[in-house]
Image (tube, rainbow, N blue to C red):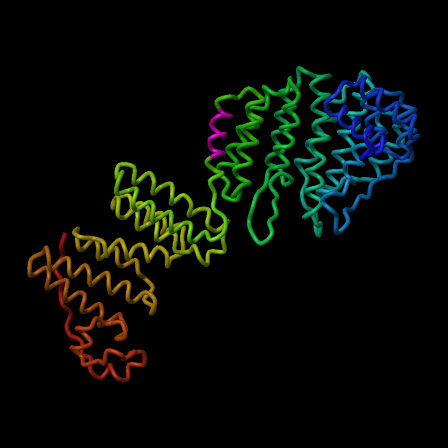
Amino acid sequence: MKKLFPNRLVLYLLIRGLARHGDLTDLRVAVNEYVKQERPSSNVELAYYAARAGMPASDVSAIAGLVVAPSIDCTDRLSRSDPVLRDCAYSFITMAYAGNTKAYASLYESVGTDRTLWNSALRHLLKACSCIGQAFRLVEHDWYEVAQESIAILVQAEQGDGERIVESIDLIREVLPLSIGLLTEQVARCFPERIAGWLNRLNTLRSSDLWNTHFGIMESREDYDFELTLWETLAKIPLVRPGLATILRGCAETYESSTMLKGQCRSSHFLWLAAIMAKCGMRKDAETWLRYGIRSSLIYGYHKDITLLYLIDVLKLVNKRQPEMALERCARVLWMVDWMPHLTDGRETKWFTEKAFSEVLAVNRQAVFELLTRLSRSTSRWQMQDCLEEYLLMAADGDPEYLWCLSELFSNHSNEHCEQITGTRQHIVDLVRESCSEDVQRAFEDRFRHFVLTEITPKHWPDHLKDEFSIPPDSDGENGSDVSSKLTFPTRRRRFPAFS
């Protein structure tokens, strides 16, 4: 039967598997067998596996061959699959394992002390891999402070002037499960009493630029897959699991409050986080976020405008059947308003706020006023004015003075909003006719008439005023040539009685 893969490839993949999940004795046997068969040189990855298996330093150096110093400047374009930083980690570990202090000091000097993201990644790897290599050699040495420094370097890293980090930041994040994972494993083995302080140090990474810089193509987005990969790696270490609770709860808080984790990405984040929590013994938290992740999987993709309008239609029907739950359901739907800027360009979903507002208005007029107050601070003015117009036109009773004051919020008397303020104030006058005395009716009619004649262009006058001044219905009234000669205004001021 023909073999699909050559023996050396199968053996090499076996070595990788044993390095991740197997016994170090079996790893050493597999590496020795591969070295005897293939006589490798300049293979820093295999040299790392040999160091991890505890093979002699001379054999490890022979497998690694000549180690080339890394470039201290990141190239303009890097493939996201480029193994440059992973190779650096393997090289640094083998050098530290071999005890070549002079060469290592030379690397420190060549890398320098810049705080750019790329340079910080190299300095982090130098310090972290130095600790890992010494731990592999089983050398009695207190390298814990150096390990702490390696994390502090990442926390302080920042984008340099002109530094392109779109691709390089992914490479840096991709190597962290290797460097920090191995470092944490050795801290747990060599300094178990310091594991709590070590995890506190790792938690500071979550406030760094390296953690909170995100890129999207034609959209605003966030993606913390790299972080979950790291915490999942650390959760494999039994001594570390109990101490991860604070970090994982912080992750849940960040993801829940973010409006840039969207679609299937949001669901996968919470499902992945729940799995890590379960592995760490956080059963209650895991169940909570598992349910949240499942709910988040009920997403919408294309044609968001149609989907949202269908949702509003369903809300109308359900609210009629179960009015006691209506306000809560409206709140859940309105929560989606905060997501709109991060999901669409707004051209087709800009009416969603008003549609949702209408449903709240049909349920609870007091609650909708609180919503209107919030919209006045958080949405575009035209959206707030549209909602205010609906609020006033749906009023069937109430204090007319209070309603009139609300109509003052239509401060923009341009052509777009003249009809709004005129229509709402006409509605207030109609309410007064139905429920107030003749004196009050007369006062509000005079107030409305004075308002229209002095502040509204004839184009937007009510029909009865156009008829009174013989203004053609199709007249635009913009230049005033066909209107001004027909207008006369009172020469004395009139007093309007105050009403409560």
On screen, residue 189 versus residue 355, left or right, reads right
Q: Is residue 32 magenta?
A: no
On screen, residue 83 versus residue 338, left or right, reads right
Quadrant where the image shows the N terminus? top right
- Name the foreground residue: 12 vs 249: 12
Q: Residue 406 occupies which quadrant of the picture?
A: bottom left
Q: Which residue lies furthest to the front in this view?
A: 1
* Residue sitting at x 17%, y 65%: 447
Total marks shown come to 0
* Residue sitting at x 79%, y 30%: 13
User: In x, y percent, where is residue 495?
Assistant: 13, 64
User: In x, y percent, where is residue 152?
Assistant: 68, 32
User: In x, y percent, where is residue 138?
Assistant: 81, 17
User: In x, y percent, where is residue 112?
Assistant: 80, 40
Query: Where 57 falls versus 302 (above or below)?
Result: above
Q: Residue 239 occupies which quadrant of the picture?
A: top right
On screen, residue 64 versus residue 322, left or right, reads right
* Residue sitting at x 30%, y 51%: 358
Query: Where 478 falls versus 273 (above or below)?
Result: below
* Residue sitting at x 84%, y 23%: 30
The rendered magenta stretch, by its main secondary structure, is classed as: helix
On screen, residue 35 versus residue 182, left or right, reads right
- Name the foreground residue: 294 vs 418: 294
Magenta-tinted stretch: 285-294
